[in-house]
Image (cartoon, rainbow, N blue to C red):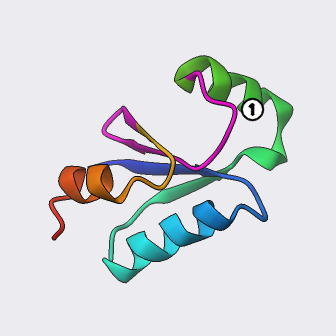
Amino acid sequence: MEIKVYTSPGCLFCRQLKDFLKDHQVEFKEIDLSENQQMIDDFIKRTGQMSVPVTEINQEMIIGFDLIKLKEKLNLK
């Protein structure tokens, strides 16, 4: 299962999402969108979103820190 988490520095919900994944020992790749304008442009094209966090699990996007969807997709209780 491939998990990517799109974030930006100073984002409280991004930090909470990453802590949640770490607490449940879920491996993920963090993509910091503040590093490159091209990455931001690509992110907006792919997701239609201008805010973070967005979690990509097997190419499906979960917008925001949505615990219900995250737990469902990751088979967590």
Residue at 49% in and 76% down = 19
Task: List x then y, in percent, for residue 45.
Answer: 62, 17
Outermost residue, top direction? Answer: 45
Q: Position of residue 33 (x, y in %)?
A: 73, 45
Front-lying residue, 49 or 57: 49
In the picture, the quarter occupied by the C terminus is bottom left
Classify 56 as above or below 15: above
Q: Nearer the viewer, residue 3 or 52?
A: 52
Task: State the image coordinates of residue 57 (x, y, percent, origin top left).
Answer: 34, 44
Residue at the limit of the structure toward the bottom, as seen here: 23
Whether residue 32 is situated above or below residue 13 in the rendered picture: above
Q: Which residues are magenta?
A: 48-61
Q: Quadrant of residue 37?
A: top right
Where 43 sits versus 74, above or below? Answer: above
Give the amino acid type for the residue marked by disc 1 in the picture. Answer: Ile
- Residue 67 magenta-highlighted: no
Numbered label tally: 1
> Label 1 crowding class (10 Å Cα cut-off): few <14, some 14-19, many 20+?
some
Quick check: 72 left or right of 58? left
Residue 71 percent coordinates (x, y): 24, 60
Q: Is residue 65 above or below residue 17?
A: above
Q: Is residue 40 left or right of residue 61?
A: right
Residue drawn at 40 percent across, 70 percent down: 21
At numbered mark 1, what does the secondary structure look like: helix, strand or loop? helix
Residue that badge 1 annotates = 40
The residue that appears at 55% across and 21% down in the rendered structure is 46
| Residue at 60% from the left image edge and 62% from the top image edge | 13
